[in-house]
Structure formats: C-alpha cells, structure tokens
C-alpha cells in the first residue's frame, strides 16, 4: 500500500510539473490558436495596394520624417562632397527661394525655384522619375515587401501622394518667394529627380 501511495504521489507531482510547463495559448472565435506578433518583425505590406501603403505612411510617417530630416540648402554641397564616383543619396531638402519657371504643359511638368541664383528644378508630374521620396525616409526597406515590383510601385504611389497635396500652381506663382520641402537624389555633382512635398508662399522668417 505504501509503495502504491508513493507511486501515485509521484505521478501526481509529474502531472503538476507538466501542466506548469505548458503555455496557455489563446484561441480565436474559430478555435484556432492566436499567434502573438513578433515584436522584431517589420511591417507586412503583402496584402495592401501601393496606394494604400502610400496613404497609410504619408501623414503619419513620411511628412514628419521629411520635416525632421530635411537638410538646409547650405548642407547640400557638404553632403555631395561625401559621395564617391557614381554613389547617390536620397535626401529631403528645405528650400527658400523664388519661383522663376513654371512649365505646366505636357506630362512632365516642371517647377523651377531660384536659390542663391541657382536654378533648382522639381517635377510636377503626372510622369515623375525617381525614388527619392521613398528612399529618403530611411525606414522603407525592400525586405518589407513581397517583391521588387511592389517596392517600385510604392515609390510611384508616394510620388503621386506628394503631388496630390500641392497647391494648384499657375502663372501667378512665378516671381513669388516660396518655401519648399522637397526630395532629391544627390550625386557628387548633381541634384536629380526633385519632387516637392509641400510648397508655401512667402519667405522663411
């Protein structure tokens, strides 16, 4: 009897140990286990359209990053001097200047702003080249997307999102002082694929 009691007690202890080692998994309404989100995982854009991704990122992340990270015009040359050979870098730039040109014909419309007597050209679309808006942010990574096509489409959607938020530009803007927040692709001797994210009349105080 004592041996049986000891054996039963041992089995009971083993059962308690096994139960204490188990992790209780919550179930959803269909009885399937709810897997906790990996806190180290990146965003999952696989089931979103490029337009949905761009719209979701724009006000909450892109614009705040652009305002925070934007280089002043005087920082452009030093940034270019750090680039080697064909190396490029996408950056946000804060521009204060005067509109000296506005081409609103065709599919590749252009805005020209003179900054310290240097013409700076930005694209007004609807055809826009480059990935500067996407890449300057620094937090949009290729591995967060299902493939190269979606990654490229998001760049185009962000360009379109930028253009959609600009004020209507007409001949009345030519000669006006403006403040522009824009994205560019810098090369050692170039400033390419510019696109404005925001344009305001008047000079910076």
Image: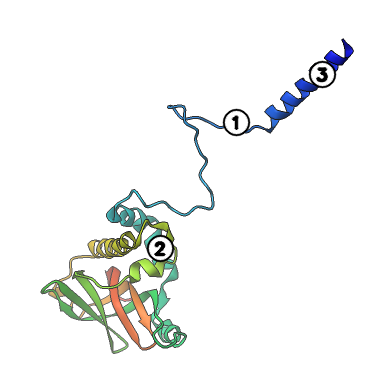
Of circles 3 and 2, the one toward us is 3
Residue 57 in which image quadrant? bottom left
- Badge 1 crowding class, 10 Å Cα cut-off, few under 14, some 14 to 19, many 20 or more, is few
Residue located at (23% from left, 71% from top): 128
Residue tagged 1:
24
**Residue 82 vs residue 12, the one in the foreground:** 12
Whether residue 66 is visible, yes or no, is: yes
Q: Earlier in the sequence, mark 3 or mark 1?
A: 3
Q: Please indicate whether residue 28 sits to the left or right of residue 99 in the image.
A: right
Residue sitting farthest toward the right: 2
- Residue wearing tag 3: 7
> How many numbered circles does the render carry?
3
Residue situated in front as seen by the camera: 94 or 6 = 6
**Pair 3/1: label in front:** 3
On screen, residue 173 above or below 145 = below
Q: Is residue 73 above or below residue 54?
A: below
Q: CA distance from mark 3 to mark 1?
A: 28 Å
Would you identify the image quadrant in which residue 69 lies?
bottom left
- The answer for how far apart the CA atoms under marks 1 and 2 are is 36 Å
In the rendered image, residue 24, in percent from the top left (x then y), is placed at 60, 31
Q: Secondary structure at mark 3?
A: helix
Res 147 quadrant in image? bottom left
The C terminus sits in image quarter: bottom left
- Residue 26 position, x and y percent, is 53, 31
The residue wearing badge 2 is 142
Q: Residue furthest left?
A: 105
Disc on the earlier residue, 1 or 2: 1
Viewport quadrant of the N terminus:
top right
- At 32% from the left and 57% from the top, the residue drawn is 54
């Amino acid at each position: 009897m004592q041996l049986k009691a000891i054996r039963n007690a041992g089995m009971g202890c083993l059962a308690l140990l096994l139960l204490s080692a188990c992790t209780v998994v919550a179930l959803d309404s269909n009885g399937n286990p709810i897997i906790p989100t990996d806190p180290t995982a990146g965003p999952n854009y696989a089931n979103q359209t490029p337009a949905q991704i761009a719209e979701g990122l724009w006000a909450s992340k892109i614009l705040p990053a652009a305002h925070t990270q934007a280089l002043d015009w005087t920082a452009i040359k030093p940034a270019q001097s750090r680039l080697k050979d064909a190396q490029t870098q996408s950056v946000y730039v804060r521009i204060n200047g005067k509109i000296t040109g506005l081409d609103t014909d065709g599919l590749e419309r252009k805005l020209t702003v003179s900054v310290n007597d240097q013409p700076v050209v930005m694209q007004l679309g609807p055809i826009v080249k480059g990935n500067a808006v996407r890449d300057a942010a620094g937090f949009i990574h290729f591995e967060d997307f299902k493939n190269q096509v979606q990654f490229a489409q998001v760049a185009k959607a962000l360009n379109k999102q930028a253009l959609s938020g600009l004020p209507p530009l007409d001949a009345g803007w030519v000669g006006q002082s403006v403040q522009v927040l824009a994205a560019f692709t810098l090369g050692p001797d170039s400033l390419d694929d510019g696109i404005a994210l925001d344009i305001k009349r008047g000079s910076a105080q």
